Image: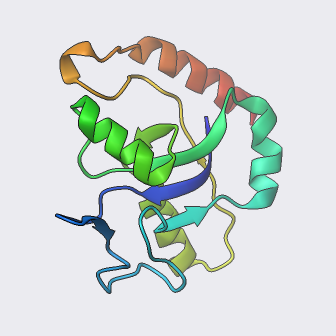
Amino acid sequence: MLATVSVYADEGLLTPEGFRDVALMGFPPDQGTGGPGTVRIAAHESLVAAIRGLVDASGPVATVSTCSGTDALAEGVRARTGALAEAMEGASVGFTAARLAPGLPFAEVRVISNSTGDRAAQQWDLAGALERLARLASSL
């Protein structure tokens, strides 16, 4: 899967009025971000064009600090971000690269090894994910 945008999904504060991301709290990782699900970094267009044909899906990927171990948490992340998948690194790597090397092209490529939601019902296929990663890496 290709992340067209990597979104911080749970960096913020859950209030009675709803989720407030770190930008709304006054701590944006860069200028121009703020609002639920908008603390995000887009993949570089040339990398998206080069990689899109090598993957099965593309769209937003949520960067989480707390993985979704309940259906309610997984649905909340999806509703806030529109993400097709959860990961733990993408947005952080993208923002770090942008700060250290402005203009450096960034894209997040993922292989999916497990589902989110209620932990007891999650489906895992680590071997299959590693096989997909090997095929993808040999195509790059």
Question: Does residue 58 show up?
Answer: yes
Residue drawn at x 32%, y 74% as measured from the top left: 22
In the picture, measured across the screen, residue 88 lies left or right of residue 138, that is: left
The image's colour scheme reads rainbow
Q: Position of residue 45 (x, y in %)?
A: 78, 59
Residue nearest the observer in this picture, 6 or 132: 6
Total marks in image: 0
Residue nearest the observer in this picture, 27 or 134: 27
Q: Position of residue 99 (x, y in %)?
A: 51, 80
Picture layout, residue 69 above or below residue 93: above
Residue drawn at x 25%, y 36% as measured from the top left: 72
Residue drawn at x 26%, y 40% as measured from the top left: 73
The quadrant of the image that shows the C terminus is: top right
Picture layout, residue 18 above or below residue 70: below
Residue drawn at x 66%, y 58% as measured from the top left: 43
The quadrant of the image that shows the N terminus is: top right
Q: Position of residue 44 (x, y in %)?
A: 72, 61
In the picture, measured across the screen, residue 69 lies left or right of residue 140, that is: left
Question: Does residue 68 show up?
Answer: no
Picture layout, residue 111 above or below residue 24: above
In the figure, residue 51 lies in which quadrant?
A: top right
Picture layout, residue 40 above or below residue 125: below
Q: Position of residue 135 (x, y in %)?
A: 66, 21
**Residue farthest toward the front in the current orientation of the protein:** 17
In the picture, measured across the screen, residue 14 lies left or right of residue 101, that is: left
